[in-house]
Amino acid sequence: MAARAPGRDAADALCVSCVGLLEVDGVAVSVISGGTSAGTFGSSSAVSRRLDEYHFTFGEGPSLDAVSSRSPVLVPDLGAGSEDRWPAFRDALLEDGIRGVFALPIMITSACVGALDLYRQRPGPLGGEALASAMVAAQLASAPLLDLISGARTVEDSEVDPHADADDDPTPDMDRVEIYQASGMLMPALGVSADEAMLRLRAHALATSQSASQVARAIIERRLVLERDDAHWPHDTNGSHHSQPDPERGSP
């Protein structure tokens, strides 16, 4: 079994503690790199991890905005008529029974590296005391993320690549192994580039209301086949149009 990333246990423990302290239903720590989701580092549950993964699947969401703006993004009611940000992300969370979402940026020195994401099933603002505590929790989340980055750099230092870009982000894509594996399988099967394979995978996730990891898992397990001819709808090996669901629904 592969070793867990440095700081992962501490990040999970912080998320679990936040659920009770902040009176929310789910918490996750997102890692954001280059304006996109690089993975969910810590979470209070498997469901919270899946919810947080929508940032990657849809390429939008409060975590990305919190990091880009370096300020909290607070959405007390995703179902409000005036809330029109992140339509795909919003609809997916509403379908999962989430009404409130709050993202607080995580800073390591002057760099904004991720966000602490809070999910709540009932609508309503995050109260002043809870918000202040959440901001402290976001500061605490920087410690396990620093362990992660330091650990990744240690590995890099022991395996020096003379052709590596010195500006490359050492943070690994924690929850993306299956996605990249599935994309690698799609490249020869569809005769497409790596970018096109990833685009096809994410497009199928959007079309079938699944996360990118669920689609990737179905491809790896041969339950889903994406065809070369774009005129044909993707099918799975059981003859239906959708891959078999990966049952991870439940309380965040």
Image: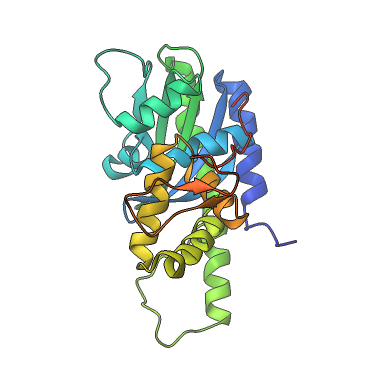
239 lies above or below 86: below
Specify whether 67 is left or right of 221: left
252 versus 139 height, above or below: above
Is residue 33 something that shows in the picture?
A: no
In percent of width and height, residue 147 lies at 57, 57
Q: Position of residue 182 (x, y in %)?
A: 51, 59
Residue at the outermost bottom position = 162
* Image quarter in which the C terminus is found: top right
Is residue 156 left or right of 200 when viewed as pictured?
right
**Residue at position x 37%, y 32% from top?**
89
As drawn, 228 above or below 157: above
Picture coordinates of residue 75, whole percent (x, y):
36, 22
Q: Nearer the viewer, residue 235 or 60?
A: 235
Out of 56 and 194, give the one closest to the viewer: 194
What colour-coding does the image apply? rainbow
Image quadrant in which you'd find residue 169: bottom left
Instruction: Between residue 204 and residue 50, name the one nearer to us.
Output: 204
- State the quadrant of the N terminus: bottom right
Q: Is residue 23 visible?
A: yes
Q: Residue at x 54, y 21 (%)?
A: 24
- Left or right of residue 49: residue 195: left
- Report the residue at 57% width, 22% height from top: 25
Q: Position of residue 124 (x, y in %)?
A: 42, 11
Q: How many marks?
A: 0
